[in-house]
Image: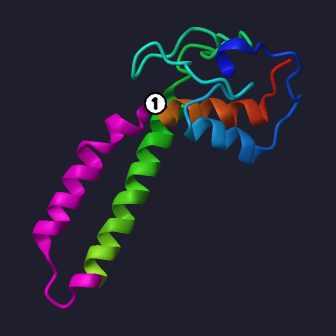
Amino acid sequence: SWLHRKVTSIDARPRLATLLGRGLRKRCPRCGAPDIFRTFYSLKERCPNCAYTFEREEGYWVAAIIINTAAIEAIFFALFIGILVVTLPDINWQAMLVAGLVTNGIFPFLFFPQSKTLWMAIDLYFHPAT
């Protein structure tokens, strides 16, 4: 269990797939420990397991916002094309509107914690902790 295990060794540079998997599961990118969020949106200052500092500098989370926006727009694009193909030749514009409102109005709020941990994972891959 993560609650009773402290980090004894950390890979110098885990594989990108490992880091991204940790990011998608809202875990520490360095050690994979859970419970790194104080609230749904607010990260703790450090990992309770390995003491990895999450926020690196002023403006650090701008990339997380970009990841969030890109992911949401990719989902919307896939839904748009899917609805378009399924409903041709009489396009269901009401379904398009609902898909647009849900993906662009609700998903960004739900996905933002993962976008933060994904950004930390990508950052750790390119700038390994020392």
Q: Residue furthest left?
A: 94
Q: Position of residue 127 (x, y in %)?
A: 78, 29
Q: Which residues are magenta?
A: 86-113
Q: Position of residue 119 (x, y in %)?
A: 59, 34
Task: Please report the residue visible at 73 percent of the width from the left and 30 percent of the height from the top.
Answer: 124
- In the depicted view, which residue is nearer to us: 41 or 63? 41
Does residue 15 lie above or below 9 as drawn? below
Does residue 70 lie above or below 85 as drawn? above
Our reading of the magenta stretch's main secondary structure is helix
Does residue 111 lie above or below 73 as drawn? above
Quarter assignment of residue 3: top right
Lateral position of residue 30 relative to residue 76, left or right: right
Q: Position of residue 73 (x, y in %)?
A: 38, 54
Q: Which residue is mark 1?
A: 113
Tell me the element at label 1: helix
Does residue 46 lie above or below 91 as drawn? above
- In the depicted view, which residue is nearer to us: 53 or 8? 8
Q: Quadrant of the N terminus?
A: top right
Q: Quadrant of the C terminus?
A: top right
Task: Please report the residue visible at 65 percent of the width from the left and 42 percent of the height from the top.
Answer: 20
